Image (cartoon, coloured by chain):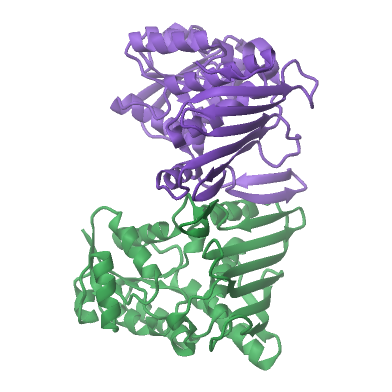
Chain colours: A green, B purple
């Protein structure tokens, strides 16, 4: 029986991860800790799991830990788990500052603990197929990339500059950066970015446009925003148009959909096929059981966060920034 | 070790089924028989399996039989397999005449043999999700259905009126009929159909339009054709637009695609996710091992063929035909 602790349930993905765990065999959810007691008690009731008053006690009786607290509090929970020698799955972005992210990776290394970052998009069959096509050479040399990551404005702590660490740019840049790093085995080297609060009355940006240079030579743009109205038929939108010397490719990660228009539930796309969150959770459980390395590591989270950090700096300074 | 015989390799799906079997554990492909020796020898070389001179001998040393011969020869191979008491997966359409189909079901019943018909579309995650939405009542009462099943003109024995039993109407009607029967738990009761040879210089029809009435009260139209040019980016196209009193649904079965344009391989959609043929073959192997009933039975094949048979009669007589 593999026992898993949930630290923080601020991020709605925590609900999804618990449901994925409950579908698996020989898994026990050891309990949930959240600083916000009413949020903790509601989630425990909704999910049928136990609340815990002290994260250290919960971690001590677990084999692995999932951190789905607010972005800015990932570090404190990772430190508790790493200090107890427990492997960790941490929601993305890894942290809100590069300093925090580096400290998290360091404490995990010191304690010989594996740190997996929740980049569910990489687990999608569409993304794996696109990588296979690129690796197979069908596009020739990749010349340029144009990406999008739109969504609805999530509200709550996501729009708190401290807890979220930013707005749409922080929330959405990292998914596309992660899959491009994986597709091309590259790093992001420069960024020129602009952003604005154009749609909602919120204290963080809801739209961002970024232009990158990659270590493998290409230019890439990314349009990331919380620009989809509440009535938009789906929560997610990740696309990538890749141009090569011998071909082009258009990937729409959430294209596996049935279009439904219903009096009861409005316009919606019903997704079928892969459940990314389940694949991510299965991978984490496999890390716990077999000791294998996670597919998406702390270092991947750090590299993606460095890109976001440099993008914000670029906007503040009005110039292209080198990503260190 | 489950041993499987392949009878006939005229249908290209035979290749796909053998490859699916080779991915599974504890499966032995006992061999391949085909009346056309050069076709048999080529397939055996391509697939790395053994040719057999006598279908009866091959069947005798197998646990189950897959029939992928020409449409008009399904009956003779099903009779050999059923006579030997072996369970059968038979390519669709079940046969080219209702008389053959009824005889096949009867001989399987007499010999206590299970007859599964290859309707791979029903195994698609998109189709299963659509059924779940309909069954969940989100559309209210279903009022009407508009379907398509297009494709490229396959050539070869498919355009031989005797071996194929017809053209695009025979080839394509049955997939959509089968999923609608499954969605609504209904039968097709009347058909008014027209067809023509409008695109290719071939002795069978390449386009058909059909209007049906269903036992559950709805009208439905189906546009089935071999109308896609050779450069069309994908071989398959099955869609269904369903209107209900409380909502509508649009299902595009092959929507899980990445768009690729390549100098080397032209315009194409690369599919990701479900491999329907693998799911179909896994179901057949489960039938052999557990004795469970197949998901798509001989009776489903017969009902779909009755619809096609009545559609051809409707065109010949220029009037709506009752489907018996």
Give the residue drawn at x 62%, y 54%.
Answer: A135
Q: In this view, does B33 lie above or below B228?
A: above
Q: Which of B12 and A214 is in front in this view?
A: B12
Q: Nearer the viewer, residue B121 or A4?
A: B121
The answer to whether B32 appears left or right of A88 in the picture is right
Nearer the observer, B69 or A197: A197
The residue sitting at 25% across, 78% down in the picture is: A84
Give the quarter of the figure containing the C terminus of chain A: bottom right
State the image quarter where residue B288 is shown: top left
Q: Answer left or right for A89 relative to A134.
A: left
Q: In this view, does B254 lie above or below B118?
A: below
Q: Residue at x 56, y 86 (%)?
A: A201
Residue B203 in sight: yes
Q: Can residue B279 be seen in this view?
A: no
Q: How many marks?
A: 0
Q: In which quarter of the image is residue B39?
A: top right
> Is A87 positioned to the left or the right of B138 in the image?
left
- Relative to A134, is B71 above or below? above
Q: Where is residue B178 in the image (x, y as percent from the top left)?
A: 50, 29
Outermost bottom residue: A317
The N terminus of chain A - image quarter: bottom left
Q: Where is residue A171 in the image (x, y as percent from the top left)?
A: 52, 76
The picture quadrant where one finds residue B200 is top right
Image position of A149 with respect to B274: above or below: below
Q: Horizontal and vertical percent for residue B144?
A: 55, 38
**Image point (35%, 15%), residue name:** B113
């Amino acid at each position: 029986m593999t026992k898993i602790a949930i630290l923080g349930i601020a991020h709605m993905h925590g609900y999804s991860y618990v449901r994925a765990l409950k579908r698996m065999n020989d898994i026990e959810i050891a309990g949930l800790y959240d600083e916000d007691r009413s949020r903790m008690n509601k989630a425990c009731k909704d999910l049928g799991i136990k609340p815990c008053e002290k994260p250290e006690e919960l971690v001590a009786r677990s084999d692995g830990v999932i951190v789905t607290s607010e972005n800015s509090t990932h570090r404190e929970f990772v430190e508790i788990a790493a200090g107890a020698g427990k492997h960790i799955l941490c929601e993305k972005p890894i942290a809100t500052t590069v300093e925090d992210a580096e400290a998290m990776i360091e404490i995990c290394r010191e304690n010989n603990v594996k740190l997996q970052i929740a980049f569910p998009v990489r687990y999608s069959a569409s993304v794996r197929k696109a990588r296979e096509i690129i690796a197979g050479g069908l596009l020739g040399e990749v010349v340029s990339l144009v990406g999008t990551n739109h969504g609805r404005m999530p509200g709550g702590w996501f729009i708190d500059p401290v807890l979220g660490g930013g707005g749409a740019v922080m929330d959405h840049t990292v998914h596309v950066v992660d899959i491009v790093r994986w597709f091309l085995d590259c790093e992001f080297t420069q960024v020129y970015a602009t952003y604005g609060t154009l749609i909602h009355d919120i204290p963080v940006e809801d739209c961002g446009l970024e232009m990158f240079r990659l270590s493998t030579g290409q230019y890439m743009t990314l349009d990331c925003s919380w620009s989809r109205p509440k009535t938009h038929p789906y929560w997610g939108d990740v696309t990538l148009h890749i141009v090569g010397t011998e071909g082009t490719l258009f990937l729409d990660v959430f294209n596996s959909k049935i279009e439904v228009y219903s009096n009861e539930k409005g316009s919606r796309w019903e997704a079928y096929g892969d459940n990314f969150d389940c694949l991510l959770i299965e991978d984490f459980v496999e890390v716990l059981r077999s000791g294998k390395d996670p597919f998406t590591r702390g270092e991947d989270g750090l590299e993606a966060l460095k890109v976001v950090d440099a993008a914000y700096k670029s906007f503040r300074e009005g110039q292209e920034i080198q990503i260190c």
